[in-house]
Image: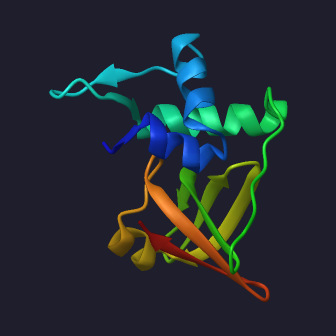
């Protein structure tokens, strides 16, 4: 399972690292330490927290912009069919849903908690694994 540093989690959530640290200190999102002492958040915990945060509207004013229609975020849901798949990404306050082939999901290794970027062009959303 992929884990994220406080700084990387903050970027994915669209907040400052200080805000992410305060949330971790308050127990809003679980952390653990790696061998070097860095605080990490498990991908599945970060995915769940990002969905909860988006639903609540957040505690603080957040500013999140799309640069050239790229939305870096974290995968919060994957629904696999026989041929097609649906992937949801929480990118700060934005929830994006993409329909793609099951094969693409498997090749990219997309699963809940994995960092990914949704790229939007016209009516299509393309997902790149970070």
Does residue 29 sit above or below 128 in this rendering?
above
| Residue 81, x across and y down, in percent | 53, 67
| Residue 34, x across and y down, in percent | 22, 28
81 vs 58, nearest the viewer: 58
Quadrant (top left/top right/bottom left/bottom right) for the C terminus = bottom left
Q: Residue at x 78, y 50 (%)?
A: 63
| Residue 127, x across and y down, in percent | 54, 74
Quadrant (top left/top right/bottom left/bottom right) for the N terminus = top left
Q: Residue at x 17, y 28 (%)?
A: 36
Does residue 88 sit above or below 100 in this rendering?
above
| Residue 7, x across and y down, in percent | 47, 40
* Residue 85 position by quadrant: bottom right
In the visual, does 26 lie left or right of 67? left
* Residue 69 position by quadrant: bottom right
| Residue ranking furthest to the bottom | 122
Q: Residue at x 80, y 26 (%)?
A: 59
12 vs 75, nearest the viewer: 12
Q: How is the image coloured?
A: rainbow
- Count the labels in the image: 0
């Amino acid at each position: 399972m992929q884990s994220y540093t406080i700084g990387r989690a903050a970027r994915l959530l669209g907040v400052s690292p200080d805000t992410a640290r305060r949330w971790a200190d308050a127990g809003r999102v679980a952390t653990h330490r790696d061998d070097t002492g860095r605080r990490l958040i498990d991908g599945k915990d970060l995915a769940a927290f990002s969905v909860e945060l988006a639903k609540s509207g957040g505690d603080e004013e957040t500013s999140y912009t799309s640069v050239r229609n790229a939305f870096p975020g974290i995968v919060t849901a994957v629904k696999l069919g026989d041929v097609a798949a649906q992937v949801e990404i929480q990118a700060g306050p934005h929830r994006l849903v993409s329909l793609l082939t099951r094969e693409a999901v498997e090749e990219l290794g997309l699963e809940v908690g994995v960092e990914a970027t949704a790229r939007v062009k016209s009516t299509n959303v393309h997902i790149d694994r970070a």
